[in-house]
Image: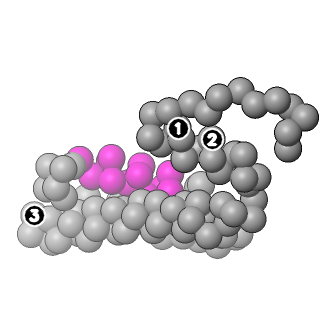
Amino acid sequence: MTALKTAPIHVLRSILRQLKTSPNINVESHKVTRAYVMEQYKSSMSASEDRAAVLRKLAYDYSQLQKDLAERARLHDLDTGADNKLTPRELSRRAAARAGLQLPKLDPDLK
């Protein structure tokens, strides 16, 4: 979807949802940021059509940036800590699952 096809309320909800689920933001900062986003949304309702289109594009781009950064952080965590967090057996099982395979059941005494 593009910025002009996406309803402003959907972009607003996306921004607020990303803000709410952000793990590295404290409560006070969350309140201030949420109030600022809501204030900007309400003030854009009375803006001219051209100004509203610019604001809508800016909000949509910000929403996409938030989503992309969250996905990047998730992929970074998967990539950097897998060998430290997971056992070799679990790493093998996940690699096989990505290829559509299942590992055979091994003797539990073989570790």
Which class describes the residues within 10 Å of circle 3: few (<14), some (14-19), or many (20+)?
few
Q: Are marks 1 and 2 in contact (CB under 8 Å)?
A: yes
In this orientation, which residue lies closer to the viewer: 110 or 81?
110
Q: Are marks 1 and 3 in contact (CB under 8 Å)?
A: no
- Give the percent coordinates (x, y) of residue 76: 55, 68
Q: Look at mark 2 in the image and give the residue it sits on.
A: 93
User: Residue type at mark 3?
Assistant: Glu
The magenta stretch is: 7-18
Q: Secondary structure under badge 1?
A: helix
Q: Which mark is residue 49?
A: 3
User: Residue type at mark 1?
Assistant: Ala
Residue located at (62% from left, 70% from top): 80
Most extreme residue toward the right, as rendered?
A: 109
Q: Look at mark 1 in the image and give the residue it sits on.
A: 97
In this orientation, which residue lies closer to the viewer: 66 or 79?
79
Q: Is residue 106 left or right of residue 35?
A: right
Residue located at (21% from left, 66% from top): 57
Q: Is residue 4 above or below residue 7?
A: below
Res 8 seen here: yes
CA gap between label 1 and label 2 equals 6 Å
- Give the percent coordinates (x, y) of residue 84: 75, 65
Considering the whole magenta stretch, tell me its main secondary structure: helix
